[in-house]
Image (cartoon, rainbow, N blue to C red):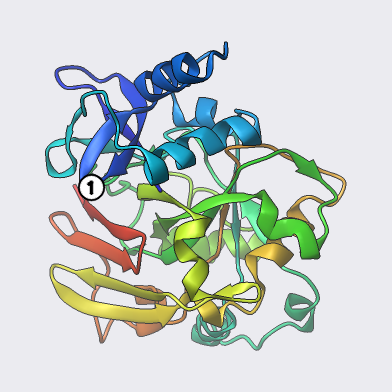
């Protein structure tokens, strides 16, 4: 399924929905219909976070509807006509990992550094700003303090059920689905911050784009091999293809990331875990001889097979 958040026409209210046959259906209306069909009493979800917090068996109602019965209630509109927000406009938390080896090696080499042995011991992450999330088509403001603005081609998973001390072997069961993620970066600021030893802060906290959909993991099952997914990833600026990679080149899988993040720490439905940048997935790696840093008016498009296209303009 493609799960979304969308703007109600005429105002800035955001509601949850889902897509079938290029039609958008409202999540609350869907669950009113489903509860009447089943004679159940639940509070219908209005936001996607509400939906993610439903019991697993109740979330399955929607899946059964999409597979068995065409919706008997009207659609909000056609997919092409509806304005999407980020699937989770304000997630509970956002951890961004550093899990593609090629990116880490190249980025460190650009700074004259070798790989540190500790990187191979466990997947590392930092907490980013869960209150600065941008959706598809939403403009991204270039911070006044940077001249080296960059994109990062990433994929993110969204946690679908609560868990703590989750074992790697069980971790994929905790994933609701995947979406495209762009971890915008102020490289000149980041370069100075990391010298202090606490990781990026102002180099990262101004914007992160997510979307356009949250695609449930069953939609990717035919591309899964063990813990990895064979899914192509691309990025372009102003129509020019710059980055190409594949999700299967993750050194640390999402199962390993979830195991690490949940060690003596509870993960909740709606928590977002980013992969880190795929190899070649940013200007920092490619070099400014390939493409200059981003400027006002640039349009950045990230595309990942099955997950759609995430497009934002720099303003």
Establish if 182 lies above or below 74.
Answer: below
Query: Is residue 183 something that shows in the picture?
Result: no
How far across and down, in percent of the image, does residue 228 sit?
59, 75
Q: Nearer the viewer, residue 134 or 107?
A: 134
How far across and down, in percent of the image, does residue 257 sit?
69, 62
How far across and down, in percent of the image, does residue 311 sit?
23, 55
Q: Nearer the viewer, residue 27 or 180?
A: 27
Query: Is residue 131 something that shows in the picture?
Result: yes
Q: Residue at x 45, y 22 (%)?
A: 34
* Left or right position of 167 against 53: right
For residue 73, which quarter of the picture? top left
Establish if 286 lies above or below 271.
Answer: below
Establish if 63 lies above or below 119.
Answer: above
Q: Residues within 10 Å of mark 1 (few under 14, many from 20)?
A: few
Q: Residue at x 34, y 64 (%)?
A: 148
Q: Secondary structure at mark 1?
A: loop
- Residue under pointer 1: 21
How far across and down, in percent of the image, does residue 37 sit?
45, 19
Q: Nearer the viewer, residue 315 or 51?
A: 51
Q: Residue at x 21, y 29 (%)?
A: 75
How many numbered discs sit on the rendered protein?
1
* Left or right position of 213 against 119: left
For residue 254, which quarter of the picture? bottom right
Q: Residue at x 65, y 30 (%)?
A: 55
């Amino acid at each position: 399924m493609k799960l979304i958040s969308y703007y109600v026409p005429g105002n800035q209210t955001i509601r949850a929905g889902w897509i079938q046959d290029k039609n958008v259906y409202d999540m609350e209306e869907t669950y009113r219909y489903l509860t009447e069909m089943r004679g159940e009493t639940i509070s219908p979800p209005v936001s996607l976070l509400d939906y993610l917090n439903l019991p697993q068996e109740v979330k399955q109602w929607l899946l059964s509807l999409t597979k068995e019965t065409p919706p008997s209630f009207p659609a909000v509109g056609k997919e092409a006509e509806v304005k999407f927000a980020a699937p989770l406009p304000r997630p509970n938390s956002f951890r961004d990992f550093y899990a593609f080896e090629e990116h880490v090696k190249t980025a460190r080499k650009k700074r004259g550094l070798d790989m540190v042995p500790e990187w191979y011991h466990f997947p590392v992450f930092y907490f980013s700003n869960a209150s600065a999330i941008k959706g598809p088509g939403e403009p991204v403001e270039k911070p006044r303090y940077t001249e080296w603005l960059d994109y990062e081609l990433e994929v993110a998973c969204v946690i679908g059920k609560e868990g703590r001390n989750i074992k790697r072997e069980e971790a994929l069961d905790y994933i609701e689905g995947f979406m495209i993620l762009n971890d915008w970066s102020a490289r000149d600021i980041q370069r100075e911050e990391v010298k202090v030893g606490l990781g990026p802060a102002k180099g990262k906290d101004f914007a992160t784009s997510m979307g356009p959909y949250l695609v449930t993991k069953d939609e990717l099952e035919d591309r899964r091999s063990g813990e990895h997914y064979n899914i192509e990833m691309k990025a372009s600026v102003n129509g020019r293809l710059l980055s190409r990679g594949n999700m299967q080149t993750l050194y640390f899988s999402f199962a390993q990331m979830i195991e690490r993040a949940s060690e003596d720490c509870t993960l909740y439905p709606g928590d977002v875990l980013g992969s880190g940048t795929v190899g070649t997935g940013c200007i920092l790696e490619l070099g400014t001889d390939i493409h200059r840093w981003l400027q006002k008016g640039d349009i950045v498009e990230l595309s990942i097979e099955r997950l759609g296209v995430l497009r934002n303009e720099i303003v």
